[in-house]
Image (spheres, rainbow, N blue to C red):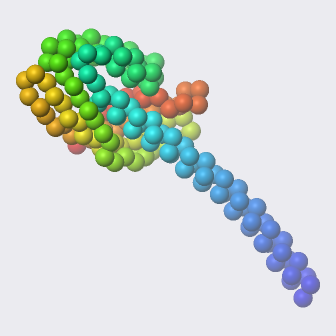
Amino acid sequence: MAAVFVILLVVAVGLAVYFSSRLGEVESNLDARGDAVQAAERFTVQVNNYDSNSVADYQESVASMLSTKFRDEFDKAMTDIVASVREAKMVSTGNVLASGVASLDQDSARVLVVADASVKTVFDNRERHFRWEVALVKVDGQWLVDDFTPVA
């Protein structure tokens, strides 16, 4: 009887150690997922919140969230857009409706984001609806946006 008790005790301790280590992995994965979602949502809100009177501040705030590769693409796109934004006196306010991790590994993630934006111009007012897949890369422990694409 004592031998059975010792065997059960050893098995119980082994299982406790195993599940304890697995719990740490799960918690770490959940933290990484949360951090990736937070970065994608922050980007989505920031890129959809702008005012034609503060385009330079807008560009700087968005650029700080981008990978080096994507920052170059963003800067090129902004060159074409700035004149139109200023001419139309655009003001946009965006918000995230839903998001979720599509894929995640140690240094990259893809997050699906659903967002809306209210855009006011001197010409009209519009409600815009976005469904994006935001690609993230981890650089020096920080999630940065490496690309985003519309999702049908």
Q: In this view, does 113 lie to the left or right of 11?
A: left
Q: Is residue 104 left or right of residue 43?
A: right
Q: In this view, does 137 lie to the left or right of 45?
A: right
User: Which image quarter: residue 67?
Assistant: top left
* Closer to us: 121 or 32: 121
Q: In this view, does 67 lie above or below 25?
A: above
Residue pictured at 37% horizontal, 46% vertical? 99
Q: Position of residue 73 (x, y in %)?
A: 34, 17
Q: In this view, does 46 lie to the left or right of 9?
A: left
* Closer to us: 90 or 128: 90
Q: Where is residue 82 in the image (x, y as percent from the top left)?
A: 23, 14
| Identity of the residue furthest to the left in this view | 123
User: Which image quarter: residue 1?
Assistant: bottom right
Residue pictured at 78% horizontal, 72% vertical? 12
In the rendered image, the quadrant that contains the C terminus is top left
Q: Position of residue 128 (x, y in %)?
A: 19, 37
Q: Can residue 150 be seen in this view?
A: no
Q: Is residue 144 visible?
A: yes
User: Which image quarter: residue 120?
Assistant: top left
Residue pictured at 50% horizontal, 32% vertical? 143
Q: Is residue 28 above or below residue 65?
A: below
Residue pictured at 16% horizontal, 37% vertical? 127
| Identity of the residue furthest to the bottom in this view | 1
Q: Where is residue 23 in the image (x, y as percent from the top left)?
A: 65, 57
Give the total of numbered labels. Answer: 0
